[in-house]
Image (cartoon, helix red, strand yellow):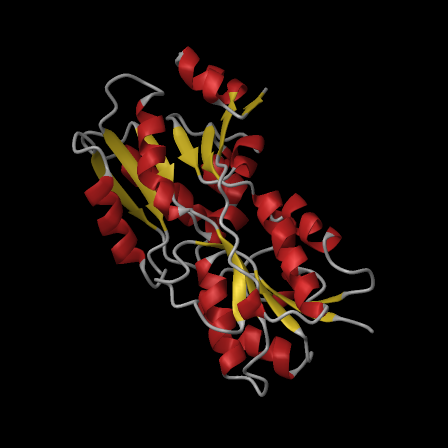
Amino acid sequence: MPSDVGFLYSGRHNSLGTQYDAFVNALPAGTTIFPPTAAASGVNNNYGLLVAQAQALVDTHNVQVVVAAGGTVCARAARDGVAASGTPGTPVVFTSVSDPRGSGLYQPNLTGVAGMTAELDSVRLRYLQQTRPGITEIGVLRNTSRYNAVQLWNTLQATADPRLHLHSGDIPAPAPAGRIRQVIQNLLALNPPIQALLVTADPMFNDLRLDVIRPGGVPLSIPAIYQWCEFVGDGGLMSVGPNLVEEYTVAGQYVSRILRGERPQDIPLYQPIKFELCINRNTANALKLDLPAMLLERADQLIE
């Protein structure tokens, strides 16, 4: 029997790369995906369009499952779009969601992957402190259009090392790549300037990954840490977080189980238990960083 699956994502399909491939490879043969690529969605990081896009996947394409890629932003939009559709019980499988319960995603027709993204930001700050002695001024690149942006910022400030001074670099979605460069330049122009950068989890930052790593085409002059190893593979210094290929494989497997007749409420949320530390040695050398041997030994991936 043919299977139709909706794929909701706020950015460009090619920014997902191997994650999307892993998802597709886990689906039953012959599954049709709407839109066939995320680039066809026309959202372009405008989160305000996602709910209507999710509703259209159900009402126009009659999909059997909606996949919400890209974390909490897309998951909540998929929930609301499906609820407004003519088939409000359509299953939703989400990926990389921080705090599914607190995000309002504990519903009978929803399941997926709890990504442990924002929950690890205070850990990422500790890794940043190891890149250079005496780091105290840290910029935090964050998307302030997220529904819980204020809560996440307050939590990060409360859990960070009290010796650190955190400076918020606010970029509401949708934002052109030039806006990212300007915000980082503003942080570097502070007195005192930031000495390192934390890039928080957000689908817009993942979609504009190369612009975040090299704002304006120029490599960052300070250490930076990201959520996922894909940033490090593209030239970023360091990341700590779950493996996205694994998460998207699980999402594809969950979709397959639903297509075979299982109910979302009978499929438990998947919680990653292994978090990768990835380090780009070339970037570290370019920044003239003398990274501690203990940090290098702890790395799951050392990218040359």
Camera-nearest residue between 44 and 179: 44
Q: Position of residue 303 (x, y in %)?
A: 58, 23
Give me the residue at 66% from left, 68% from top: 258
Residue 258 shown left or right of residue 95 in the figure: right
Give me the residue at 67% from left, 53% from top: 23
Q: Is residue 233 above or below residue 11?
A: above
Q: Position of residue 131 (x, y in %)?
A: 36, 20
Residue 261 shown left or right of residue 278 in the figure: right
Image quadrant where one finds the N terminus = bottom right
Q: Is residue 101 above or below residue 26?
A: below
Image quadrant where one finds the C terminus = top right
Q: Is residue 15 visible?
A: yes
Q: Is residue 46 visible?
A: no
Camera-nearest residue between 244 and 304: 244
Camera-nearest residue between 182 and 87: 87
Give me the residue at 49% from left, 73% from top: 79
Q: Position of residue 194 (x, y in %)?
A: 27, 31
Residue extending furthest toward the front: 266
Give me the residue at 46% from left, 29% from top: 238
Q: Position of residue 168 (x, y in %)?
A: 27, 45
> How many discs mark residues in the rendered view?
0
